[in-house]
Amino acid sequence: MLSRDGLRLDEAFRYMEPLVRWSVVLLGVMFLWAGIVIADRVTGYRRARLQSRQFIREVQNGFLEDRCDEVMRVCDQRSGSHLAQVVRAGAQEFLLRKQSMCLHEFSNSLDLTMRVEEQKVDQELRRGMAALANVAATAPLVGLLGTTVGILDTFRGVGMAHSTVVSMMAGTIAEALATSALGMVVAIPAVWGMNYLNDRFEILRVEMSLARSEMLRYAFRGRAGQSKIEEIAKAGGLG
């Protein structure tokens, strides 16, 4: 494949200034990395949503029948679901603390435990997103750096040759500008991918918040019912 000045692309790459050449290599690496991160997160988010749909269908009976052991079993079975991880942390805390705290302390402890688990799941869901943001922000700058160095080299060569022939400058300037274009080619898909993933992530975060609220309602109902039974039993004993 030929470039506009008749050189093969591999020859044009070989004749570039070292810094320009490294800019092209770095942009290639950034493009591959952005593609890997986007593909990995899209696949992970879709898998989490699928697991969560199945989790919601299967865990309903456990909540309706007040069977925390059934809730735990479904959470373990659907461990790939972001909802299951949050609910499982709440169910464990419920079983551990339901008889050792007053109702207010119990609710606070349960809420804190699930919020901590949410933060852990958040970190897992956002894995690679910071690197993708860096690619989107720095790729145009890397391309501009290559262009600047290439143009400076062009004018330096013209000055050394004591010539102002435009045809001699055109090929080199075109190669220099190619790095800016390549930077845009890398940055634009990275920005689109990052915005798409951020939208998906916000949906998953809202779903986790709703799951935490549902678990709190279930635990509060169970703990309040148990407290009422204990009060009735104590009153009966006093009578």
Image: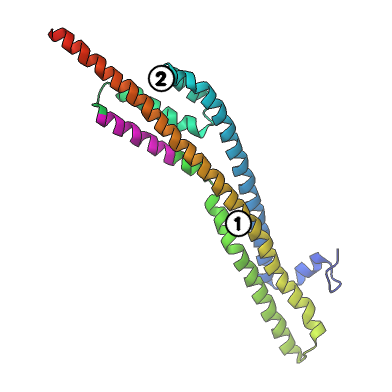
Q: CA distance from mark 1 to mark 2?
A: 43 Å
Which residue shows up at 41% across the image and 36% down it?
117
Looking at the rendering, which quadrant does residue 156 occupy? bottom right
Looking at the rendered image, the quarter that the C terminus falls into is top left
For this rendering, which residue is in front, 153 or 73?
Answer: 73
Q: Please, is residue 239 above or below residue 67 in the view?
A: above
Name the residue beneath numbered marker 2. Answer: 68
Q: Can residue 141 be seen by looking at this rendering?
A: yes
| Side (left or right) of 180 relative to 218 | right
Which residue shows up at 38% across the image and 38% down it?
115
In the rendered image, residue 9 lying in the magenta stretch gets the answer no
Name the residue beneath numbered marker 1. Answer: 191
Circle 2 Cα neighbour tier, 10 Å, few/some/many (<14 / 14–19 / ≥20): many
| Side (left or right) of 97 relative to 158 | left
Q: Position of residue 129 (x, y in %)?
A: 54, 50
Looking at the rendered image, the quarter that the N terminus falls into is bottom right
SS for dot 1: helix
Look at the image and give the residue range highlighted in magenta.
104-119
Q: Please, is residue 38 above or below residue 174 in the view?
A: above
